[in-house]
Structure formats: C-alpha cells, structure tokens
Image (cartoon, grey):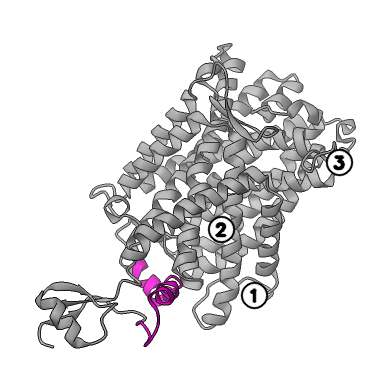
Amino acid sequence: MSGYSFITSGVPRQPGESKWKYNIRKSFTIKSLASVDDDAKNSTLNKELGVFDLLMIGLGGIIGSGIFVLTGEVAGTKAGPAVVISFILAGITASFSALSYSELASMIPVSGSTYTYAYATMGELVAWIIGWDLTLEYLVGASAVAVGWSGYFVYLFSDGFNIEFSNSWTSAPITYNNTLGKFEIVPGAYFNVPAFVIVILLTILLIIGIKESSRVNTMVVSVKLIVLTIFCIAAGIYVDPKNYSPFIPPNEGSFSQFGFTGVLAGTSVVFFAFIGFDSISTTSQEARNPQRDIPIAIMSSFGIVTVFYISVCLVLTGVVNYKLFANDPAPLSIAAKETGMQWLGIFVDIGAICGLISVILVLLMGQPRIFLAMANDGLFFPKLASKIHPRFKTPYITTAVCGLLCATIAALFPISILAELTSVGTLLAFFIVNIGVIILRFTAPDAPRKFRVPGGPFLFPLMGALLDLLLLVTSSKASIERLFIWMAIGLLIYGLYGRNHSKANNFNKIKFNNVGIDVMEMENIDDIIKTSKN
C-alpha cells in the first residue's frame, strides 16, 4: 500500500448497500460538536464584539419595519386595535425560539446560526434546507425593510421641507394581486431609488469592517429607542378610548379580514417584527465571549422590544381609527400628525429612518456569514463565499453580491410581498431550532451548556415548534407557494453541487502517488490499483 493516503474519512459504505440508499444516508450525516468547535477556533474573523455590541445588534435587527410599517397595515386590514394581540401572540411564539437559540448559541458558537444548529442535530440535508431558507430572512428581509425606509424617507422630506418626490422613483413597479393571484405592473412606477441607494451604502460599510458597522448600528439604535419613547409619551396624551371600539372588528367574509381569524393572520405577518434577535448568533465568531454573551444579548433584546411593541400599538390605535392605516407605509407619522404636533411627525420620521437603517445593516451582516459557514463545509461555492478581505477581515465578496441582490429586490417589489415571504421563511427556521434543542438534549446530554431552556426539552421548545407550525399554516397561500418554490431551487443546487463537495461526506477518495481516486464503486484493492495505473 506504499504511496496510498486517505484524503478524508467518514461513514463508510456498508456491504451490499445500494448507491441510492448510501447517498440518502450520507445526506443525513450529522456534523459533530467537536468539528463545530474546531471551526470556531480556526476562524479568521476579528473577535471585536462584547455583550453591549451584541445587544445593540439584537435591538438593531428587531426594531424596524415590524413596528414602523407593519403595525398600520395589520391594524387597517386584518386585526384593528387587536393588532396588539397579534403582537403578543407573535412575541410569545418568538420567545420560545429565543430561548432555544440561546441554548444552542451557548453550545455552538459559530457564524452559521440555524444552519449550523441543524447540521449538528438533524444532518446535512436539513442544514442545507435551513441555510437556503435563511436567505429569505436575511436578504429578502433586508429588502423589505429598505422599502419601509424609503417610505419614511419620502415622508421626512414632505413633512420637514415640503419636498414631494415622484412616486415613479420611490415606489415598487411590481405588485401582487391577491384576488387574481398574479403579479402586476404598477402604472407610472419604475424603480424605488431610495431603497436601492440605502442598501448599497450600507453594503459598503459592512465590507469596511464589523467594528465600524457595530458603531454605526449602536448610534442609530440609540436614536430610535429615544424616538419611540418620546412618541409613546407625547402621542399617548391624545389617546381616545373610542378608537379601541370594536377592539376586534367583525370578520368581513375572508379568513384574514378581521375577526379572530384576522388576528391570527395578523400574527403571522407581525411575526416579522420579532425577526432579528437570531442575527446575533450569526456574529458568534466575532464575539469575544460568545457562550456567555450571546444568550444574554438575545434574551435582553427580546424583552426590551416586547415592551416597546405593546406600548406603540396601544398608542397608535388609540390616537387614530384603525381604518385610516390601511395600506399606508408610515403609520407612526399618521398618528403624530393627528396630534397636531408637527415637530413630533418630523421627529418620528427621523427616528424611523435611523431605526430602519440599523435593521438593514444587521440583516445584511447576517446573510454573508451564513454563506461563509456553508462554504466552509463545502456545501456552497468557496471561491465566492469563503474569501475574507485581507485588511478588513470581512466576507467581502458575498457581502457585495448579497447587497446588490437585496438592493435590486427592494427597488422592484412592495413591502407586503417581501415581509410575508420573510416571515414564512423565518418560521421554518425557528421550527428547526426548537426541534434541534430537543434532539441535542438526548444525543448530547453532557455537552457543555452555559444556558439551558428552563422546564426541560419538552416544554418551551415543543410549544415553540407547534406555534411556529400554526403561524406557518395560517400564512397566505401565495407566500407558502413561494417558499416551496425557493426550497425546490435550493434542493436542486444541493443535488448538483453541495452533496458532491461536502467535506463531511466526500470521503470516498484516496490518494495514490498524489492522484485522487474515487473508490465508492470499487469492491477491493485490485480495482483501486488498476484505476490508479490508468
């Protein structure tokens, strides 16, 4: 056997096992926690982030379009004043996932977030599905927020400077007709320029460095927290209890149009408002003490935003009749104007602009790091996703590509389509995380955990998984169809590329005199020698 050496090792093909059965079994190979730990130790990313930076990333990622934009749409078209119930239900559902994320992050401190958690619990194929699915949360989610930012940008110039921008260059040229079930072109609309430009500028910032991005994020998060606090206090004086009646408007004949079913449908939409805390886990390899700091940051940020969301919803629907919010991109500006305080309207516009910038920044920060983790495992294109800038120490190529895609999507599509697609994608990811906690409690019961979900593996994680499924099935039919189409595209890429380049599974090669030979179909050493000579 002189001259032979194994390239890799892994689960061998069993005697008499067919090729198809072998490939299916390989697709569910689980990545060991030891291997995950090695990835964390070998990371070339700069460890710059402390617990305060991580908390600000969490708040930056969560408080955005959900509160500044979607509150009005859900109140005006689905839940009425009971939008606050939609937020509470969404918050309860997301809180279970937040607990599960905290436990897994304390065990698996790498940049892959849900993707890596799935790889360590349910195998490679499920990990790929989730990694591909996360694109809907981060890249499409950032596009949705950029559309919301554009709306408040237009309001600011209108309220503060009496400058009116043309709808042709500040709104989406494509919309979706729910009645006819098809996409339509919006007459007179060509390109959402503000949404495109803000994404490109933030992409450049992210390429420059994680610490610089964190500083900008901390600054704008501080501004939006101050603005939301002042809005609740100043506008709260003008709350009219009559606007809360009826608190749950009667159903108008459609599942999602008011009534209790409308509240549930609204919950699946405003769930978008709680997306972002999981982006903290995508920066694990850039955190100084991830096992301790990430759980603290996740739970703290989640608690803070829940208080803000409930307060804003109560003030918003108390100041203005819910019907006036339908299909308006800036509900807080409407409520501020209703008080007669012009300064409050301008103040809210500034706060929304700052607040939405931080969300775009955090979501754009997470997507390239998901691709980086996938590329390091061989499942995604390494020449594209594994490149780290020699000076800035950031995944600059995928950051640039993701930024350009995100900007283009934001310039062409409305927030309603993007937000719903983001929500269903995130619900699927959260479902996997909750199941992952349950699995690891049995498969790795003695693994170090600096944070444990209270109540055992079957209380909060199982409840979270069931609620995720409930909200998923109450999402719009069109959004679920788009989710399946996106997943089908991902499975095609995995079948054609990922499974053939997986580092965990491509062990069926040996080297003979530095020549690689595929031995999966070979039965004995004679076949190997014969092939090597050829």
For the point 31% across and 64% down, the residue is 501
- What's the residue at 68%, 18% (across, down)? 342
| Magenta segment boundaries in residue numbering | 13-40
Q: Which residue is identified by label 2?
A: 429
Disc 3, SS:
loop
Q: Position of residue 52 (x, y in %)?
A: 50, 53
Tell me whether circle 2 and circle 1 mark residues in contact (CB < 8 Å): no
Q: Work out how far the residue at label 2 is from the one at label 1, CA to CA, in angstroms.
A: 18 Å
The mark that comes first in sequence, 2 or 1, is 2
* Residue 52 in view: no
Q: Residue at x 10, y 87 (%)?
A: 2
**How far from the left and from the top, in percent, is residue 373?**
38, 60
Please name the amino acid that badge 3 sits on: Ile
How far apart are the alpha carbons under marks 2 and 3?
30 Å
Quarter of the image with the N terminus is: bottom left
Q: Which residue is mark 3?
A: 248
Q: Amino acid at mark 2?
A: Ala
Q: Quadrant of the C terminus?
A: bottom left
**Which kind of residue does numbered mark 1 sit on?**
Pro
* Front: mark 2 or 1: 2
